[in-house]
């Protein structure tokens, strides 16, 4: 029986749920930090939906409240700490830049200081949820660990601080601390305002007869979309290594938002034909002639990243990690889960 203890910040998020499941399956005692919410009480959020509520130890805390972080780390006494908590929405970070920095940048620092203050530098291992957003409009394709960072959003800048701080604690205090530089990863519990989930929910609604067109922003953006279950396995592998390091996790394939729309609607048997251009472009259901997708400039970003695609060679060679879930399977399962939710059967 595994007696290791893990603490996950951001346990109520997409990755937090998948990681908690993985660690429970491996026999870990799993603790999670969550913040108080008036709308998502026990049993009504993603943890509740996945049935994990009763199997993890939940502690109230907030990344902007250093004392609460110290208390949670002290009470959980974890062997492994996964820092997943973040204001993780890039567009929102332009509207709430200072809050984003407080949670993502200073929150990471508070957590690392808690490890130091509680004399856990030699006993605890630390994972920082870093991101491909750090690369910005990179001058290298695909992006790897050595590619120069050119962050283009308050979100990315806050995560850059956290990545550098994590490296600093590794070098200054010999903490087993690793950054996972993860490219986009999705799943059936993805937040509803991220583009993939917006699209899979719209496809599910379309199949149920709701003909309201989906409003999207930049259809030309290209992302490297993988499946979150593969990526949380990579996080765990990083903390099982003798030495800490920083790793890119990516599929190596990229697609446009437009292609994601086509794949999601194909799952429900609908072919999308694109007409017009720019803000006037629409995606038409070829069978009915109805517009299924329209462009709404409110979803454009003040600074966009046109193309991200990752090279996960280091993770493959050192961790033995490679993605197992194909793009097609991931999209199909996301749409199927949204169809089931619409019918009242949560998956
Ligand atoms: P997510 O679904 O947005 O989850 C974020 C989590 O952080 C939620 O549990 C949220 O709690 C929590 N949180 C936010 N602000 C907090 C605060 N002030 N104090 C405590 N907790 C707070 O994100 P995700 O997709 O699972 O991603 C996990 C991590 O990986 C994030 O750090 C994200 O930036 C990073 N990342 C994600 C991707 C991706 O493609 N998914 C790629 C690269 C990096 P509530 O439920 O209360 O909001
Ligand atoms: O946007 C474009 C948008 O918000 C993807 C986070 O997990 O991954 C995520 O950040 C692309 C962008 O994810 C809409 O402009 C078009 O080019 O789904 P997203 P993201 O910004 O890539 C990274 C790796 C993280 O670290 C983040 O935490 O899609 N796009 N139309 C749209 N995006 C949204 N949200 N909504 C639209 O209507």
Image (cartoon, grey):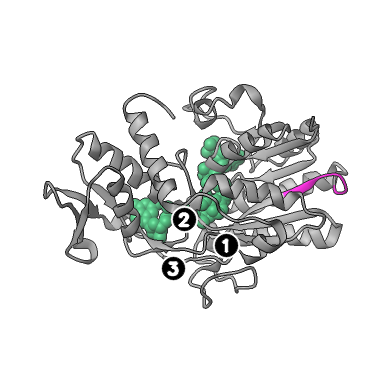
Is the shortest distance between ligand 2 and the CB of mark 1 under 8 Å?
no
Badge 1 marks a residue whose secondary structure is: helix
Numbered tag placed on residue 307 in the rendering: 3
175 on left or right of 195: right
- Mark 3, other Cα within 10 Å: few <14 / some 14–19 / many ≥20: some
Is the shortest distance between ligand 2 and the CB of mark 3 under 8 Å?
no
3 on left or right of 295: right
Instruction: Kindly report the distance in space between the C-alpha atoms of the residues bearing marks 1 and 3.
Output: 18 Å
Q: Quadrant of ligand 2?
A: bottom left
Instruction: Kindly report the distance in space between the C-alpha atoms of the residues bearing marks 1 and 2.
Output: 22 Å
Badge 1 or badge 3: first in the primary sequence = 1
Q: Would you say the magenta stretch is mainly helix, strand or loop?
A: loop
The single residue placed furthest to the left in the displayed view is: 289
Where is 214 relative to 134, above or below? above
Judged by depth in the image, the label closer to the viewer, 1 or 3, is 3
Residue tagged 1: 157
Residues 178 and 36: in front is 178
Residue 82 forms part of the magenta stretch:
no
- Mark 1, other Cα within 10 Å: few <14 / some 14–19 / many ≥20: many
**Residue 170 percent across, percent down from the top left:** 80, 59
**Residue 5 percent across, percent down from the top left:** 77, 35
The quarter of the displayed image where residue 18 is located: top right
Badge 3 or badge 2: first in the primary sequence = 2
**Residue 185 percent across, percent down from the top left:** 50, 51
Is the shortest distance between ligand 1 and the CB of mark 2 under 8 Å?
no
Badge 1 or badge 2: first in the primary sequence = 1
Please report the bounds of the magenta region as a residue range.
Answer: 121-126
Residue tagged 2: 225
Badge 2 marks a residue whose secondary structure is: loop
Residues 269 and 57: in front is 269
Judged by depth in the image, the label closer to the viewer, 3 or 2, is 2
């Amino acid at each position: 029986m595994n007696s290791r203890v893990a603490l996950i910040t951001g346990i109520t998020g997409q990755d937090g749920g998948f990681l908690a499941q993985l660690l429970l399956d491996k026999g870990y005692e799993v603790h999670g930090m969550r913040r108080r919410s008036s709308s998502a009480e026990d049993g009504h959020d993603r943890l509740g939906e996945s049935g994990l509520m009763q199997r993890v130890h939940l502690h109230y805390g907030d990344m902007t409240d250093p004392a609460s972080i110290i208390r949670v780390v002290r009470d959980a006494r974890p062997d492994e700490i996964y820092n997943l908590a973040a204001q993780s929405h890039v567009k929102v970070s332009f509207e709430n830049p200072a809050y984003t920095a407080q949670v993502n940048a200073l929150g990471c620092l508070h957590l690392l200081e808690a490890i130091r203050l509680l004399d856990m530098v030699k006993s605890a291992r630390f994972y920082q949820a870093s991101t491909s957003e750090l690369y910005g409009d990179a001058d290298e394709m695909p992006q790897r660990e050595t590619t120069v960072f050119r962050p283009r959003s308050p979100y990315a800048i806050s995560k850059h601080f956290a990545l550098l701080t994590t490296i600093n604690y590794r070098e200054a205090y010999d903490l087993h601390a690793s950054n996972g530089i993860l490219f986009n990863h999705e799943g059936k519990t993805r937040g509803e305002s991220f583009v993939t989930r917006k699209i899979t929910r719209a496809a599910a609604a379309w199949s149920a007869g709701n003909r309201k067109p989906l409003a999207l922003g930049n259809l030309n953006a290209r992302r490297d979309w993988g499946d979150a279950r593969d990526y949380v396995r990579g996080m765990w592998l990083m903390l099982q290594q003798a030495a800490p390091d920083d790793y890119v996790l990516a599929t190596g394939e990229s697609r446009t938002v437009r292609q994601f729309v086509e794949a999601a609607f194909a799952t429900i048997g609908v072919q999308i034909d694109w007409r017009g251009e720019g803000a006037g472009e629409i995606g038409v259901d070829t069978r009915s002639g109805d517009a299924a997708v329209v462009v709404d400039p409110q979803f454009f970003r003040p600074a966009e990243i046109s193309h991200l695609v990752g090279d996960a060679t280091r993770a493959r060679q050192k961790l033995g990690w490679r993605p197992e879930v194909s793009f097609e399977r991931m999209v199909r399962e996301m749409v199927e889960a949204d169809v089931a939710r619409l019918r009242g059967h949560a998956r």
